[in-house]
Image (cartoon, grey):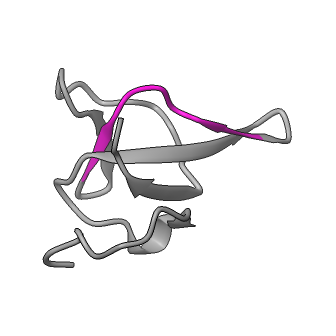
Amino acid sequence: MGDVQWLPDKWLPVSIAPQDTDLEVCAIDGGEAHALVFPVRKLGTLWVDASTKKQVDIQPTHWRLWTK
C-alpha cells in the first residue's frame, strides 16, 4: 500500500490493511465491536503484536493507523 500516512483517522475495512505497519484494529466479540488496546501488524495472513512479534489470535474487521 506504500505510504499510509495520508490515511484518515476513520476505520477502514481490514481487506485493505497494509502489511508491516502499526495498526489499531477492531474485532467483533459478543456482537459488539472492540478495539485492541495495543498495536498490531499484519504479516501475510497473520496478525502479530507490534512490540512482541507474537501472533495474536484475532479476526479483525476494521483498522486504522496506530496513533496512541
- Spot occupied by residue 58 in the image (x, y as percentages of width and height): 50, 37
- Tally the marks: 0
Q: Is residue 36 magenta?
A: yes
Using the image, determine if residue 49 lies above or below residue 64: above
* Quadrant occupied by the N terminus: bottom left
- Left or right: 50, with 28 as reference point: left
Residue 51 falls in image quadrant: top left
Q: Quick one: 51 or 65, which is closer to the camera? A: 65
Q: For the point 34% across and 45% down, which residue is it?
A: 66
Q: Foreground residue, 53 or 38?
A: 38
Q: Does the magenta portion include 19?
A: no
| Residue occupying the far top of the picture | 52
Q: Which residues are magenta?
A: 33-42
For residue 64, what is the image quadrant? bottom left
Provide residue 35's location: percent of width, then percent of height.
Answer: 58, 37
Figure quadrant of the C terminus: top left
Q: Position of residue 59 (x, y in %)?
A: 54, 46
* Residue found farthest to the right: 31
Q: Is residue 44 above or below residue 67?
A: below
Residue 57 drawn at (x, y percent)? 45, 31
Q: Main secondary structure of the magenta part?
A: strand
- Residue 6 found in image quarter: bottom left
Q: Residue at 54% of width from left, 49% of height from top?
A: 60
| Residue sitting at x 34%, y 44% | 67
Q: Left or right: where does residue 3 sit relative to residue 7?
A: left
**Looking at the image, which is closer to me, 31 or 39?**
39
Going by the image, does 59 lie left or right of 44?
right
At 23% across and 71% down in the image, what residue appears? 4
